Amino acid sequence: MIKHVSVMPQKAIDLLKIKEDGVYVDGTLGRGGHSKLILERLKKGKLYCFDLDEEAIKESKEVLKEYDNVIYIHDNYMNMNKYVDQVDGILLDLGVSSPQFDEAVRGFSYRYDGPLDMRMDQSDELSAYEVVNEYDEERLAKVLYEYGEEKNAKRIARKIVEERPIETTLQLVEVIKKALPYKVLSKKGHPAKQSFQAIRIEVNHELDSLKHFLDSFDQILKVDGRVVIITFHSLEDKMVKYCFRRLSSVDDDKRIALRPEEVKQAPYELLNHGDKADKEEIENNSRAKSAIIRGVRKRYGKDSY
Ligand SMILES: C[S@@+](CC[C@H](N)C(=O)[O-])C[C@H]1O[C@@H](n2cnc3c(N)ncnc32)[C@H](O)[C@@H]1O
């Protein structure tokens, strides 16, 4: 079984500051690593765990079998308001887990050959196959450029359209390589990494889920409740950073730098300014390299601001 090593576990727990009788949500259960740490600190409290991937839920039930205060929900974390109300803390550890990435059959990997799938939720209709084989050139280029920040998006999209049908992940890698100039191919890093990231984000509507969550979590968070989010690429981190910054400033429109006494009035308090994993963690877990963790604490309820 491929294991998943949780990123910045101690930092996440410190930022969440678990109350032993609190109600918590792990929006991205994965293999239950962060959930276990939360459960170890809960005495009378409860933990709601969400994942789009049924396999993640099945495996985590085994990891967390000693706990009877866990509720597993196979749904998008953006829908958590339908299931929970008034929680003390929410954790999101975004992106894919190592088993999803490393099992060829899931189609996320540019290293192993597998079907063009990339769906976190196996019951979704849209898979990477449709994005790669059915999107028109312009739409495909937009996906690659916006979600992968791929500078050669247009060239890659053109080549993909020329070479269709493309059936497997390694065929797609070859097509991407054909589209790229030697200068880019000779650089460090896998040449298909950004395109694969972009297609995965499109297939799983990842930014839409995050946006919906950021717009709605306030409704279910108790006063003094905390939200902690770990992101793995700049687009997600920017969304989290701007949302947390807006919530922690009084002047919503101008978002100006505030004097310390004004900052105290803001409905939320920033718990940090975006921390990264330390060198030792990155050496032991390469997934931690691009991770950024941010947290906020709610100071006042709606009626008070
Ligand atoms: C990085 S892993 C989480 C690992 C977990 N924190 C651990 O320590 O084991 C991300 C997980 O979130 C799930 N996921 C991603 N986006 C989701 C969403 N919008 N709703 C629910 N689950 C999601 C993925 O299927 C994956 O299992």
Image (cartoon, rainbow, N blue to C red):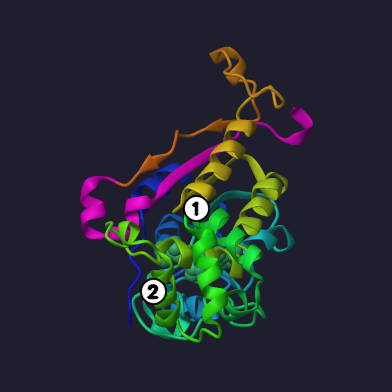
Along the horizontal axis of the image, is 289 left or right of 199? left
- Is residue 97 inside the magenta stretch? no
Q: Earlier in the sequence, mark 2 or mark 1?
A: 2
Q: Which image quarter holds the C terminus?
A: top right
Disc ID at residue 281: none
Q: Which amino acid does label 2 sit on?
A: Tyr
Q: Residue furthest right?
A: 303
Looking at this view, is 151 or 300 the one in front?
151
Q: In which quarter of the image is residue 47?
A: bottom right
Residue 23 appears at what percent x and percent y? 58, 54
Q: Number of labelled discs? A: 2
Q: Badge 1: few (under 14), some or many (20 or more) residues near its Cα, within 10 Å?
A: some
Q: Residue at x 47, y 64 (%)?
A: 195
Neighbours of disc 2 within 10 Å: few (<14), some (14-19), many (20+): many
Amino acid identity at mark 1: Glu
Which residue is pictured at 56% across the width and 63% down the height? 201
- Give the labeled residue for mark 1: 149
Residue 289 magenta-highlighted? yes
Is label 2 in a helix, a strand or a loop? Answer: loop
Q: Residue at x 58, y 32 (%)?
A: 245
* Above or below, comparing residue 11 to residue 134 in the picture: above
Query: What is the span of residues highlighted in magenta in the rendered image?
Result: 278-305
| Numbered badge on residue 110 | 2
Determine the residue positioned at 25% across, 52% down. Answer: 281
